[in-house]
Amino acid sequence: MKQICQDLRTEHAELDTVVAGLDEKQWMLMTPSPTWNIKNQIRHLAYFDDRAALAASDPDGFAKHIEEVMSDIAKFMKTLDEVGKDMPIDELMSWWRSERNKMLDAYTAMNPKDRILWYGPPMSALSHATARLMETWAHGQDVFDALRLKRTNTDRLRHIAHLGVKTFGWSYTNRGLQAPQTPVRVELTAPSGALWTWGPENASDKISGPAEDFCLIVAQRRHVDDTRLRVIGETARDWMLKAQCFAGPPTDGPPPGERVWEK
């Protein structure tokens, strides 16, 4: 768990540095996520880091939380809309920092294969931490886009790229569809220049290009047509249109051209 926790801590710190320097007006800037400003993005992360800390440190307490959620989903959704909404920015930042540190402390004490309850099926501790890194990076991208800042990515993207590949089948079953049986070869160039690969070398369907673009697609932050990925084959193309590496009901990424601003 040492590496994923270290990478998650760094991901937190980099986003923290960006938002900590914003003024009140900038915190209210709308992000590409409908109806969400930058403050909404951070309070969303803070709340689910809080829940992740509970899930990793107190399974019985989290199980009780899930029972409450399932008994009144409308109430839970209202909580998500309101939690932290009226917090002053300094208080929100303190809350986020406190909860993410509690979460990391809990992860660090676990073995990678330990099981953690979550809102969907239970996950390994390693997968749980990877999902939190992905969420931090994805919501961070919304913040970068709102501020029109060019992001400098690192090889921490490998965690997200691997999650994106692993959720190939999920992207279909979550929509009530049968996952295609056609294998897809994925060849991604890391920010460091390293080559990351998944799938059989002789697969007729293939996705290749920058790891950053692949991660933006599976996290539904860019449309495949707005990236530098080379996509060959019907299954590969269909996957890139349906990809969803996060839990929750099926959603679609942005349409072509909607989140393109970088020169």
Image (cartoon, rainbow, N blue to C red):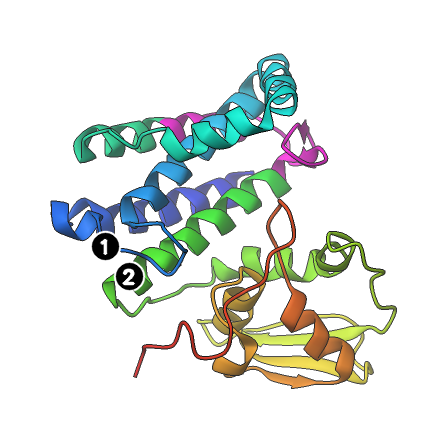
- Left or right of residue 190, residue 102 in this image: left
Residue drawn at the location 38% of the way across and 27% of the way down: 99
Residue 197 can be seen, yes or no: no
The residue that label 2 is drawn on is 146
Q: Looking at this view, name the residue that lies furthest to the front.
A: 74
The x, y position of residue 132, in whole percent, is 51, 43
Q: Amino acid at mark 2?
A: Ala
The residue that label 1 is drawn on is 29
- Left or right of residue 25, residue 108 in this image: right
Q: Identify the secondary structure beneath mark 1.
A: loop
Q: Amino acid at mark 1?
A: Leu
Examine the structure image and report whether residue 104 is included in the region drawn in magenta. yes
At label 1, counting other C-alpha atoms closer than 10 Å, the crowd grade (few under 14, some 14-19, many 20 or more) is some
The x, y position of residue 57, in whole percent, is 54, 19
Residue drawn at the location 74% of the way across and 55% of the way down: 175
Q: Quadrant of residue 84?
A: top left
Magenta stretch? 99-126
At label 2, counting other C-alpha atoms closer than 10 Å, the crowd grade (few under 14, some 14-19, many 20 or more) is some
Q: Which sits in the foreground, 199 or 177?
A: 177
Q: Which sits in the foreground, 119 or 21?
A: 119
